Every structure is written in C-alpha cells, then in structure tokens.
Amino acid sequence: MSPSLLIRRTHMYLALFLFPWLLMYALSTAVMNHRALFVDEAGNGAPQFQPERELTYDGVFPEGAELRTISGQILASLDLDGAHGVTRRKDGAIVINRQDLLTPRRITFTPATRALVIEKLPHRTNAMLERFHRRRGYATGYTLDTIWAVTVDAAIGAMMFWVLSGLWMWWEMKVTRPLGALAFAGGVGLFALFIATI
C-alpha cells in the first residue's frame, strides 16, 4: 500500500470510528454558543436541582475521616459511587456533587441531625451536552472516567492527524492547489485576526 493510500484510508477510518465524539463536541459547542435559546419558563438558563428523596443516614465514619472518605462511604451506601466533588459548608453540612452525564445529583448530609437530602437535575438536552463537553476523567480515580479521557485524547490526536493529512491530500491534487491555497490563507488570516483583536 502506498503512503498516499495509507493516509487516505487512515483519515477515513478514524473519521468513522470517532464520529460520535466529534458530533457531540460540535453540538455541545453550538449549545454553549447559543445559551439564550435554552431558557425555561422561569427564566433559568440552567436546570435547577429538584428534590428526589430524604432519609436518615445511620452509617458510622472512621475517626477523623476526611471529606473524600465520608463522601465515598455515603455514595456507596446509596449505590451512587462514582466521580464527584465534595465540600463542607460553614454550617457543617457536607455537600456532595455526584457527576453524571445523564442525571447529576446533589447530596447534602447534615451531621447534627444525620439527615441526608438527595436532589437531582431534571433532564435537559442542552445541559447534558454541556456536561459531555466539560467531562474530565484522569483525576477522578474511576476506570470508566479514565477510559473516557483516553478516548478524548484519541479524538484530539485524530483531529490533529486530519489537519495534517488534509494538507497532504490537498497538496497531492495539483488541480486543487490554487483554490486550496486561498482557503488555507483565508482560514489562517481570519483566525489570526480573531487572536489579535478579541
């Protein structure tokens, strides 16, 4: 197989394999660029947490347990273990934000009363797409999140390859060189203008 054919085939198969990720990034960027189109009846651009259930938590934490230990134990008891952030409010309540692409939840634990309040975000496609776009994985410590992060890195690598292989394919087709050079110069010039003026 010639180098030219190998590059063309790789260009094509990478596009087919990573199509869902690139479509998601395109749609989520469009959503973020046009947030004003996604305001609900109450004037909220982002969905608000809604009560899901309340219960009394009777678990016992290790002596001197750190916040991550406490949050992990609470989430495991609720069958909600996964990527999350945790903070302690000034009143002593522990707030866990359980990250989830489809149904994020906020769990508030009040140590004084042992009360556990679970809230969730209602489904809104624009908010879900933004969560997809902003999802990070390497730092969470969860395997699926790490796999997601590796896949995103693969998509980034594929995009870089597409740019370079596109230049290769354009240069190989002599008949397209003048128009291609105009398109290339136009794109570079417009991008440079934005960088210099925005």
Image: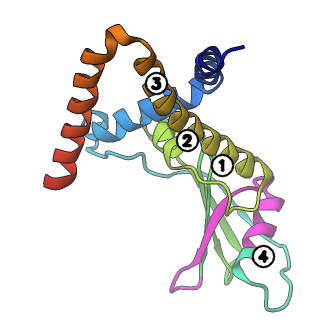
Give whichever of discs 4 and 3 has the lower sequence position.
4
- Circle 3: element type: helix
- Circle 2: element type: helix
- The residue mark sitting in front, 3 or 1, is 3
The residue shown at (58%, 76%) is 87
Query: Which circle marks residue 69 in the picture?
Result: 4
- The residue mark sitting in front, 2 or 3, is 3
Scheme of colours in the image = rainbow
> How busy is the neighbourhood of tag 3: few (under 14 within 10 Å), some, or many (20 plus)?
some
Q: Quadrant of residue 34?
A: top left
Q: Nearer the viewer, residue 164 or 131?
A: 164
| Picture quarter with the N terminus | top right
Give whichever of discs 1 and 2 has the lower sequence position.
1
- State which region is magenta: 70-92
- Residue 193 is left or right of residue 73, and the answer is left
The residue shown at (68%, 71%) is 115
Residue marked by disc 2: 156
Q: Specify whether residue 125 is in view.
A: no
- Residue 192 is left or right of residue 141, and the answer is left
